[in-house]
Amino acid sequence: MIIKSKDDCQDQIDYLTDLLERDFSDKKKSLIERELKYLYSGKKGEETSAYYLEFDFRKSSNWALIHDLRLEHDGDVAQIDHLLIGRMMDVYVIESKNFNSGVSISDEGDFSYFYKNRPYSIPSPIAQNERHIRLLDRFLTANQLLPKRLGMTLNPNYRNIVLVSPKSRLTKPKQGTYDCSGVMKSDQFLERFTDDLSTGSMLNLAKVISQQSLHSFAERLALSHEPITVNYLAKFGLEESDSFKVDAVELDQTDVPECPKCKKEMVKRSANRGKNIDAEFWGCRDFPNCRGVIKIEKPEKIEVTELSMPDGTPPLCPKCDGDMTKRSSKKGKNPGQMFWGCNNFPKCFGSRAL
């Protein structure tokens, strides 16, 4: 059963994408682009692992699945990608990694990822996940969240798992002192899980909790999630000013078009340089992966003169359902022509013919 889904990071991606379009130095933009790449990569890796985990466990009442759990305790933080909890208090703490070109583990446990066929050393995700497990254990104990049976607290059996994309090349040592058996491709986890069940001790049966207790324990843990808030202006050393402040655009969902290239939802943006500076346009939400745009035609500027209302109730605006006023066009193709114009003009350009 799924207790918590991954937090949506699309707002962060949109914000960074808007910052990227502002008039900053190339050095600042490279920092923003790197952050965007990190978000896209992490999102893809977690979504891939989540797909396989949910396929195998979403219908099970004996296992609870929590995605994207961030815990804070005594000044320390643990960002756990996936948590799989069973009724015998087996707790799989799962870290997701997205290595497009592959990852290699040496006999000594050193991790390297490949980019353009060149290896680059990275911190050990096994050691990183071990720190997450220690903080999780301290957090559960300090907050008295662990279930009890016959008055005895049931201690979890933690398992450290690192999942990489099924498309990645994974090279592990055949022998060595470093145990990297917990590192595997996402589509291989079920095989590892089945092996663990078959080799489990019968003593674990003494720790079996009910399905209701499992659900309650997992829900209380998920409620401890502390969403992260990043001040990107401070992180990148940017000063907030009216020249680049990113304003949210509230739109009716029905007014948002699809991207002509990838069919995803679009976001309203404005150009910050070039001959069309300040011009608004629709940009693909998946930018920079997709650069689909739709030009927004500016409504014809109309000077209006409000006239006295005739007898009867005026119609409602077809765009915002606001009240309308009888007006006459002073410019454009049909000067002098009467029409119903929205009272919310110029915020709304709704009109009706007489």
Image: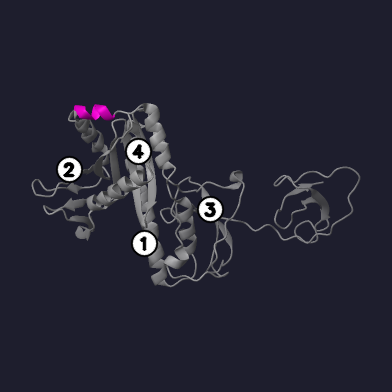
Q: Residue at x 60, y 43 (%)?
A: 254
Real-space CA distance between mark 4 and mark 2, rounded to the nearest whole angstrom: 28 Å
Q: Which residues are magenta?
A: 202-207
Within 10 Å of disc 2 (Cα), the crowding (few <14, some 14-19, many 20+) is few
Where, quadrant-wise, is the N terminus in this rendering?
top left
Residue 119 x, y percent position in the rendering: 19, 59
Give the distance between the C-alpha atoms of the residues marked 1 and 2, in whole angstroms: 31 Å
Colouring method of the image: one colour
Taking depth in this image into account, of 310 and 59 the one nearest to the observer is: 59
Task: Tell me the chief SS of the magenta region.
Answer: helix
Label 2: element kind: loop
Mark sitting on residue 267? 3
Residue 292 lies in the magenta stretch: no
Instruction: Looking at the image, tell me whether mark 1 or mark 2 is earlier in sequence order.
Output: 1
Is label 4 in contact with label 3 (beta carbons under 8 Å)? Answer: no
Q: CA distance from mark 3 to mark 2?
A: 44 Å
Say which residue label 2 marks: 181
Disc 2 residue type? Ser
348 or 159, nearer to the observer: 159
* Horizontal side of residue 344 vs 185, given as left or right: right
What secondary structure is found at the residue carrying circle 4?
loop
Residue 78's place in the image compared with 144, above or below, is below
